[in-house]
Image (cartoon, grey):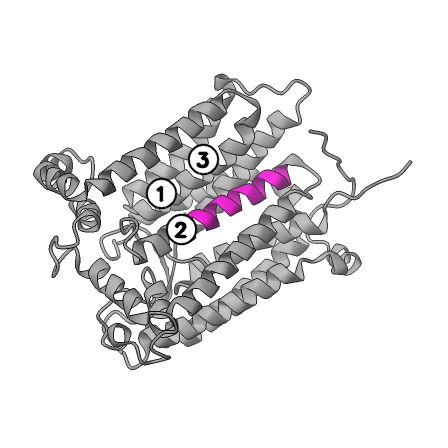
Amino acid sequence: MDWQHENGNRGIDVEVLRRNFREIDFSLIGILLVIAVYSCVALLAATFGKSGGDVPAHIVTKQVIFEVLGIGVMIVTAAFDYRSLRKVHWWIYGISIFLLIVVFGFHATAGAHSWIPIGSQGLQPSEFAKLGLILSLAAYMADIDESEFPDYSLKRSVPIFVLFLVPFLLVLKEPALGQALVMFAIVITMYVVFAQRSHFLLATSSLLVVICVISVIAAGFSQQTADWLVQQQDFLDSHHIMHGYQLDRIISWLDPNYKPLGAGFNVHHAFLAVGSGQVFGEGLFNGAQTRGGWVPNQWTDYIFTAIAEEFGFVGSATLILLFLMLIYRLVKISSTSQDAFGTYVIIGVVGMFAFQVFENVGMNLYMSPSTGITLPFISYGGSSLIANYMAVGLALSVSLRKKKLRFA
């Protein structure tokens, strides 16, 4: 593939924004603004009438502030020439790894070393480590694509998985299985595009097929699989293959009657909340499961249940449609990139968003195990929201510097 390069200053370029104002993808920004409104309304519904306990104080106000900060970060990132990041990607990757190590020096929150406390708030390095991983993978893959004799052999693929394994294992150690799985989705998505010219695409596709087949078989024989996992629970936990709570989440997904007042409590009431919404929902502040506080962590992992219960199938389907439109716009931008680096960056962002939406909505609908993955742009959280807006800002930076047709 031939990629055109432009010379000029790199970095924040307000002139590029002014000159290419009409090139800004306003439909993408409009989609994000509608999703932001969805987020604030859903958080208001999920926390209405609740105070104290695990519910953060002034949660909606904080989310609005995070939204404004996120949009500001997105604009600054869009103005910044994404090509400059290619030169410093090792620094970005190194800083993200350093922060993933630093978290172990602080006390665990909810059983995980995932946060660096900053005043009354906290920084979650794993959210930004995903972007560091995307940038480093994109730079390496682009270097191979743009070399005089591109080499897609196994030898050249090994560094890709080394780059992935370091943050993946650190995040898994926290433990934050959900974030680790998102990183896995990122590298697989980018590698499928990268390896399309080699036989390793077949190997990658085969791995995905095997995972899907195993999942389908496990779901088809859910009771038998759940019984077998219960028998193997002590072995898997004692040998540190899987933590007990992680096994409980898988078993409760396979067997709805497993520990209904324990490990299965969350998914059971989430399923009830989604079903209660029916077609048009029970109305804002009228959801029995939501108002009663029966769904734990409804402002983070299970926020989709608040939307489904109070706005029904219509409201939740509209949100999913918005996410599909967001993914479509990002893919559209990737096809106009002037270089391989920009294309790979956006493909990584697409993989990140698509997997998070699929897994979060899936676990709320009892279609997949609970993994602690939040819903992008919807769930409460400053680090995740700002990192997500930064990711979209990178895509907008690519779109502002997209390739143009030149005639001799």
The first of marks 1 and 2 along the sequence is 1
Reply above or below: 249 against 1: below
Tell me, yes or no, whether the highlighted magenta stretch contains residue 342: yes
Q: Nearer the viewer, residue 46 or 284?
A: 284
- Residue range (magenta): 341-355
Left or right: 252 as drawn, with respect to 333: left
The first of marks 3 and 2 along the sequence is 3
* Amino acid type indicated by mark 1: Ala
On the rendered image, what quadrant is the N terminus found in?
top right
- Structural crowding at the residue carrying mark 3, measured as other residues with C-alpha within 10 Å and reported as few (<14), some (14–19) or many (≥20): some
Q: Position of residue 256 (x, y in %)?
A: 17, 54
Mark 3 vs mark 2: in front: 2
Q: Is the stretch drawn in magenta largely helix, strand or loop?
A: helix
Label placed on residue 44: none
Q: CA distance from mark 1 to mark 2?
A: 15 Å
Residue 381: quarter of image: bottom left
* Amino acid type indicated by mark 2: Phe
Task: Identify the element where label 3 is drawn.
Answer: helix
